[in-house]
Amino acid sequence: MSGHCARCGAELRLKKHKGEKFWGCSRYPKCTWTRKRFKDSPG
């Protein structure tokens, strides 16, 4: 599991944009909070 959104508490999902992976809120587009994915994090 990746965790929860710091803004709204929803689950985070691994997303990809322009070849770069990051964690994004599952409630997008209502919530646009994101977190960078570090190389040592799962996913």
Image (cartoon, rainbow, N blue to C red):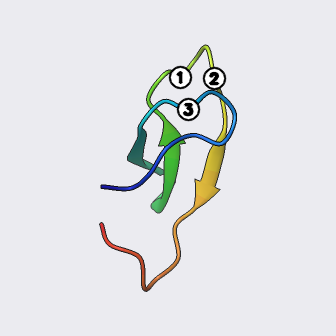
Sequence-wise, which precedes: disc 3 or disc 1? 3
- Residue at (62%, 55%) from the top-left corner? 35
Q: Nearest the camera: 8 or 17?
A: 8
Q: Residues within 10 Å of mark 1 (few under 14, many from 20)?
A: few
* Residue topped by disc 1: 28
Whether label 2 touches label 1, CB < 8 Å: yes
Q: CA distance from mark 2 to mark 1?
A: 5 Å
Q: Which residue is mark 3?
A: 9
Quadrant including the N terminus: bottom left
Instruction: State which quadrant residue 5 falls in.
Output: top right
Q: Position of residue 40 (x, y in %)?
A: 42, 85
Mark 1: amino acid: Tyr
Q: Residue at x 30, y 66 (%)?
A: 43
Q: Is residue 25 above or below residue 36?
A: above
- Horizontal side of residue 6 vs 4, given as left or right: right
For image coordinates 41% across by 47% down, the residue present is 15
Q: Are marks 2 and 3 in contact (CB under 8 Å)?
A: no
Q: Name the mark nearer the viewer: 3 or 1.
A: 3
